[in-house]
Amino acid sequence: MRKLFWLVVLGAVIAATFAVVDLTNPPWFERLRYPLRYSEYVRVHARRHDLDPALLAAVIYQESKFRAGARSSSGAIGLMQLTPQTARGIAIRTHGNAFHTKDLYNPEINIRYGAWYLDNLFQKYGSERLVLAAYNAGQGNVDRWISQGEPIQFSETKAYVSRVEDLKHIYRDAWRAKLYQ
């Protein structure tokens, strides 16, 4: 009976600890939940393209959970889930030499191309929400929504935009020292 009592007490302490952690979301806990890999590449390419490094990290997390070898069923590759067609276009516009699809598995190249692409979308749309919508749903869809005066039409894209914006705040708070050096 005494053993059962202490197990119940221990369980209550553990549950209370997790409840407090969940409610307060301290940065150390968020760093465990939301890793930041390749922080130097994120900082360098965010700075080069005048992007918020927390936004760049948030897109990477949402797209691949920082797995450089990620590949989607639609053929998007790497950290920022770029398609070979999009990456080839970026390589041409940035005077890249001999682009190969396997280059997208290289974290530095993938982040460099993804940052360039986000910058290009910001130049076109100006709004973070529209940039993220275009990154997720494609520029053609966003252009059509804008021309018809409509908000984002895909529920998946609305959820994506909201999630990345939430992740941006998490990354900014949890990884400030690494992202804004």
Image (spheres, helix red, strand yellow):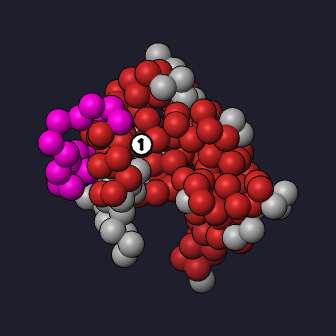
Answer left or right for 145 relative to 122.
right
Q: Residue at x 76, y 54 (%)?
A: 146
Give residue 14's position: percent from left, percent from top.
60, 61
Q: Is residue 26 left or right of residue 114?
A: right
12 or 63: nearer the viewer: 63
Image coordinates of residue 153 in percent, x first then y, are 75, 68
Pick the front one: 85 or 31:
85
Q: Is 11 above or below relative to 35?
A: below
Quarter placement of the N terminus: bottom right
Residue 153, magenta (yes or no): no
Nearer the observer, 47 or 67: 47
Q: Circle 1 sits in a helix, a strand or a loop, which is it?
A: helix
Q: Is residue 102 left or right of residue 75?
A: left
Residue drawn at x 23%, y 35% is 96
Q: Residue furthest right?
A: 149
Amino acid type for the residue under numbered disc 1: Gly
**Which residue is found at the position 33% from the left and 57% from the top?**
85
Residues shaded magenta: 93-108
Q: Quadrant of residue 137?
A: bottom right
Q: Rate crowding at label 1 as few (under 14), some (14 to 19) or many (20 or more) other CA atoms within 10 Å.
A: many
Label 1, on which residue? Answer: 114
Residue placed furthest toward the front: 147
Question: Is residue 28 visible to us here?
Answer: no
Residue 81 locus on image (x, y percent): 39, 57
User: Any magenta on residue 96?
Assistant: yes
Res. 62 visible in picture? yes
Q: Nearer the viewer, residue 21 or 49?
A: 49
**Where is residue 174 drawn, in percent x and y?**
56, 36
On screen, residue 153 above or below 176: below
> Is 14 displayed left or right of 117 in the figure?
right
